[in-house]
Amino acid sequence: MSLLGNLMAQQDPLYSQYMFNGLVLNPAYAGSRESASLTLIARRQWTGLDGAPSTGSLSFHSPSRNDRNGYGFTFVYDQFTPVRRMDFRGSYALRIPLGKSWLSVGVQGGFDQIKADFNTVSVKNPNDPAFSGNVFNILRPAAGTGIYFRSDNVYAGFSVPNVIPYSLHPKVAETLESRRYTHYLLTGGLVLPLGSAVKFKPSFLARMVAGAPVSLDLNGSFLFAEKLWIGGSWRMKDALVGILELNITPQLRLGYAYDYSISGLGSYQRGGHEFMLGFDFGVEKDRMLSPRNF
């Protein structure tokens, strides 16, 4: 007797500090920090679980001299035994001033490399066609688009990071195939002053993909004296997240997030850790009149 069906699983990396690293979600974010900006993220998900995902990302972006264009790139390394994925994207954003606000329309292009060796997986049936002799290393084109609005106190964006769905490898059985599906991301947030030295920043991230339920992150963070962010997130049916970010200088910021699992995997792992380092180059006083809340 055999059982046949479809399985939908996590395909794109998760980020707990998405609100501080917009370019990995939306190419229209390029240039929005009003200076050249570099962000590094290292993430280890489901610690204590063999083969758990580990993710690293590097993003860089900058506005043009006249502020009407934004340019950037992202590199993402994602390892989930026995699969390794590397994504590279170059981004461009057309920035349209709306008084003191900006509306940006962005596009990105690049490639995904996916490498897997399923011979390293222990299976009960060594003749399972999904794993027997299944080694592949493929390169696929990628392209995405997005729109992003930002003022001093509000932001919102919608993006499709990759509009090109593709097969991860040729069919290894008549009814067995792995595919990369198109994801849709919706983000938003605002900053509310709570006195002279405290601000409150609620935000959200919704992820949508065909064949799977909507995934939602809700976050609330407090900013103290323009230096320290303290907050938390609820990731629907998955995790509770604690977040800290310290603005060490106007240029340098350091962040940490801890994921506490509330899903069925909670009994088998010890949560997740995510570290973030950001640096803004060439910050000028006239560009710092409005604090960088997004």
Image: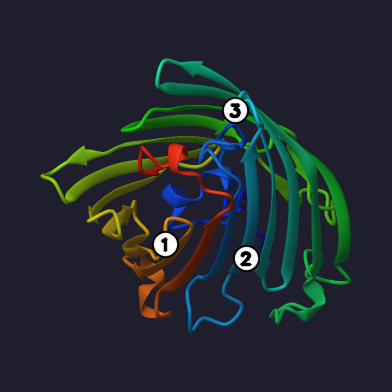
Residue 64 drawn at (x, y percent): 66, 32
Q: Earlier in the sequence, mark 3 or mark 1?
A: 3
Amino acid carrying mark 3 in the image? Asp
Circle on res. 249: 1
Determine crowd level at label 1: few under 14, some 14-19, many 20+ residues with C-alpha closer than 10 A.
few
* Residue located beneath label 3 in the image: 67
Q: Which residue is mark 2?
A: 56
The kind of residue tagged 2 is Gly
Left or right side of 207 for 81: right
Q: Is residue 238 above or below residue 25?
A: below
Residue 215: image tag: none
Residue appearing at x 17%, y 50% in the figure: 198
In this view, the residue farthest toward the front is: 285
Three-letter amino acid code of the residue under disc 1: Thr
Relative to 250, does residue 132 appear above or below in the rendering? below
The x, y position of residue 145, in whole percent, is 65, 29
Q: Secondary structure at mark 1?
A: loop
| The N terminus lies in quadrant | bottom right
